[in-house]
Image (cartoon, rainbow, N blue to C red):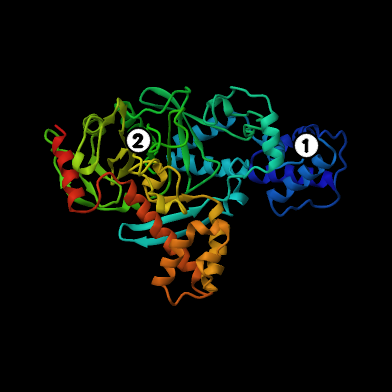
Amino acid sequence: MISTAIQQLVNYGLDTGLILPDDEIYIRNQLLMTMQLDDFTAPEGEVCYTDLESILKTLVDDAVARGVCEDNSTARDLFDTKLMGVLTPRPSIVRANFEERYESEGPQAATDWFYKFSQDTDYIRRYRIKRDLKWVTKTPYGDLDITINLSKPEKDPKAIAAAKLAPQSAYPKCQLCAENEGYAGRMNHPARENHRIIPLTINDSAWNLQYSPYVYYNEHCIVFNNQHTPMKIERATFRKLLDFVGLFPHYFVGSNADLPIVGGSILSHDHFQGGHYEFAMAKAPVEKKWVFPGFEDVDAGIVHWPMSCIRLTSEDDARLVELADKILTAWRGYSDEKCFIFAETDGEPHNTITPIARMRDGKYQLDLVLRNNITTPEHPLGVFHPHAKLHHIKKENIGLIEVMGLAVLPSRLKKELFELADALVARTPVSQYPEELQKHAEWAEDILARHPELNGDTVHLILQDEVGHVFAQVLADAGVYKMDEAGRAGFVRFLASVQ
């Protein structure tokens, strides 16, 4: 039985091209060593398999039964990654493959190959990504993408307890560091034996390309500094982003902002996110054209989008860097009491930018989204942040991905929305809702008032649509200039101040 599973994994490696026929005996012996087995009985007849997940489960179950692997979710993930690491070619081979394709077939052929490779090695676990719930909601701002993320593994209590007991280590410094490539992991750091990165040069400095193991959209990639250095939005950022889309014109790339609340989750390591996908914000039109003095050659304007976005387009990337830097400098020091925008309070800076770059019709394009992270007693998590009445759906920071029109919602919502659907169909009084649904009570009453026709057949589609509209409101809350007369007048005042 276990010999069959080992041969199935070897065959999987051969079928995906991770290993070559010359490697078969060697790889099989490496797998035996990893499993702590010292003999192998060749299975009779043809060895078939259905999917990678079931092969790995068979092998890990056997390792757990023999005490080779602990029985908790994290230890299992560490162990099956170790198995996949045996099949994963060394970095030098992967990079040579990528470079050869880039040179002979072009950037898209290179990334197509690397993306499939990152899935074949199980670094991106296809079978987990499939579990994510995804839908699209039509809104006045365009079609917003909604996803409830179920692919990020939730730790079980045994794994949490083991992580607490694990010795603390500062290596690698964070999950984005280049030192993760091939790292075995531990109870409080994921295994990365099957992880490979592609070195890049942008702005004459060493960076790397990899994919996100939790693919939120097509070819969701991460571009990260070779040095463990903090996030910073500055002139060089625009240069790096445009250099990247010059190398990979079929990808967009953007950066989270560099301040807490409006920034991403990892501010300690300078990185961007990109991919082969067009978000609602990229499709949104320019609603008001603007000419910046001295930059008459750059097409500019305010984008019709709930978050305050300036779009710059030019064939000359150096001109975009110049103008974007001017706008950033102006915004860092800009205050407008009428719109409750303050550059700083008590010496703490509040203004920054979320920048996104792409190629469009052979021209370079930069979207600059204005951000401000001020807090007040009424809005302790941020004035330009989802307001409290939306926290039952989305409480987390609005980072780059959300800014562009994709909601990444917490996994708890899957269960809550199913239970809420039952309560809505049964017309259960909100006072009788269980505790975990109480936070949705006001929203549920509002949905029923607007959808008296709601029944068992329509409830799930109605709820999905309503979640999408909550996300549209989240974006409106996070926009520094509202899409009303006063907000637009404030936006124009800022643009006029950029000299």
> Which residue is at 54% across, 68% downward?
423
Query: What kind of element bears circle 1?
Result: loop
Marks 2 and 1, the one that precedes in the sequence = 1
**Can the viewer see residue 20?**
no
> Which residue is at 21% across, 35% downward?
335
Q: Does 363 appear above or below 148?
A: above
Q: How many residues crowd mark 1 within 10 Å: few (<14), some (14–19), many (20+)?
A: some
Q: Does 419 appear above or below 46?
A: below
Query: What kind of element bears circle 2?
Result: helix
Q: Residue lying at the far bottom in this picture: please name it.
A: 453
Residue type at mark 2 is: Gly
**Can the viewer see residue 16?**
yes
| Total labels drawn | 2
Side (left or right) of 169 relative to 269: right
> Which residue is at 22% across, 43% downward?
339
Side (left or right) of 197 relative to 371: right
Q: Which residue is mark 2?
A: 246
Q: Which corner quadrant holds the C terminus?
A: top left
Side (left or right) of 376 relative to 156: left
Q: Does 264 appear above or below 289?
A: above
Q: Quadrant of residue 366?
A: top left
> Which residue is at 42% across, 55% downward?
145
The one of 72 and 270 positioned closer to us in this rendering: 72
The one of 310 and 343 positioned closer to us in this rendering: 343
Residue 122 placed where, x, y %? Answer: 63, 42
Residue type at mark 1 is: Cys
Side (left or right) of 441 relative to 179: left
Q: Which mark is residue 69?
A: 1
Q: How many residues crowd mark 2 within 10 Å: few (<14), some (14–19), many (20+)?
A: some
Residue 376 placed where, x, y %? Answer: 34, 39
